[in-house]
Amino acid sequence: MKLDRSYQLFLEALKYLPSGVTYGNRYSEPYPIYLERAEGQYVWDVDGNRYVDLWMGHGALIMGHQYRPVVEAAVEQLRNGAHFGYSHEWEVKWAKQVCSMVPSIKMVRPTNSGTEANMYAVRLARGYTRRTLIGKFEGGWHGGYDGLQIGVTYPVDRPSSLGITENTARDTVLLAYNNLEETERRVKGRNLACIVVEPVMGAGGFIPAKREFLKGLRELCDREGIVLIFDEVITGFRLSPGGAQQLYGVIPDITVLGKAVGGGPFPAGAFGGREDIMELIDLRKHPHPYERVFHGGTYSGNPLTMRAGYTLLTELAKGEVYRHINRLGDRMRGRLEEMADGHPLHITGIGSLVCLHFTKEKPYDIHTANRTKNVEMAKEYFRHLLSKGFIFVPPHVPHLFISASHTEETIEQICDVTEEFIRARLV
Ligand SMILES: Cc1ncc(COP(=O)(O)O)c(C=O)c1O
């Protein structure tokens, strides 16, 4: 495979961008592949190679690359004005659509990223409860906000970035994913403002929560007056039109959204929930700034993102796409599980989310996903897939996003090349 131009770009990038990339998880050894174009399930690099994409814009592109209705709506909006800084019709349509799809959301506000949405959700919960401490789960990734970038990376014994103060770290209580008893023990007597949880742990490797665990969390929060926040940045609009909460039948107080909520290709996030909580942002009900929670930003609710988001969501609301992507996901997990049997390889995921764990034990939390993990094997698998024309990042976490543009044939091909890999490397 010829990669001369990617290499040249990387050498140039190293001079101006730390580690040569714009986001650490886009880095791969010996150097990242630079893309030029994308369409449907494919991406093309600057050296003319074509790959089947299994990363799909960090999972944002549920319909695949360049989904026509969104592209056309966006082009028209670019002509009308992509950034007004005033109110407009598309934000009203978008908000109504989000509220009609996500069971917990009665009112909503847009942001520019999932990170930002989580930050505001936590602030809202603190404002509502007048409490300080926030609960989150070991291994849970909610973006780069200080209060939540704690206990993300294994072995979760310190903040997952430099620059997070001890005071901030003290205000975050780490909880045990899929372990209700231990979580209750850690929550007891702490007076938490909120608990933030991903119904399916994403960056941790697509580890679904057990239904009883999520139900138990709901009851715990009700008993203790804690605001339950579901981070559905990945699962929202992906697992069903109403996200994981619809699938699990567990309704949080606040839901955080991202990725697809802005149509897929545009920077987006959102948070929404119960009316009595969201009202704390309302300047008509709370005229004095000291009595309300601030939210806003230059680009929040920009017409480009709102129109693109509305266009995508109205299509997803029909529900048809889920039959296709979930069937592909079931097929892929089914075949991979069969071939992994008896090997240090475990398959997790749900719906259109599929992850391969090169571990000796089946992962159900951050510890089981990491303590026996063979990182080098995961990277080797990445290189194997790449050499066969399949691409994803980051190389050490093969968590794969299936989109509506993927086909049954593609899924069989991925399984075939994985089987080759298992036969050659995991005997
Ligand atoms: C579950 C979850 N929450 C929050 C975020 C942060 O979203 P963003 O990258 O848009 O800031 C991500 C990003 O992948 C995520 O997976």
Image (cartoon, rainbow, N blue to C red):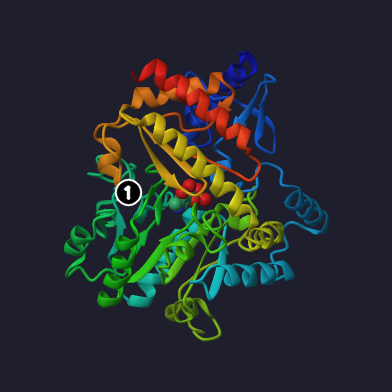
- Give me the residue at 47% from left, 54% from top: 115
- Give me the residue at 52% from left, 25% from top: 416
Residue 52 appears left or right of 203: right
* Residue 175 occupies quadrant: bottom left
Amino acid tagged 1: Ile
- Report crowding for label 1: few under 14, some 14 to 19, many 20 or more residues within 10 A (C-alpha): some
Q: Is residue 371 visible?
A: yes
Q: Is residue 397 visible?
A: no
- Give me the residue at 38% from left, 77% from top: 128
Please state, as top left, top right, bottom left or bottom right, where the C terminus lies in the image.
Answer: top left
* Residue 188 occupies quadrant: bottom left
Mark 1 highlights which residue? Answer: 164
Residue 6 appears left or right of 275: right
Please state, as top left, top right, bottom left or bottom right, where the N terminus lies in the image.
Answer: top right
Residue 97 appears left or right of 399: right
Respond yes or no on whether mark 1 lies under 8 Å from ligand 1.
no
User: How many labels, in total?
Assistant: 1
Q: Secondary structure at mark 1?
A: loop
Q: Nearer the viewer, residue 279 or 71?
A: 71
Percent coordinates x, y for residue 99 in the rendering: 58, 72
Q: Nearer the viewer, residue 143 or 146?
A: 143
Percent coordinates x, y for residue 357 in the rendering: 36, 34
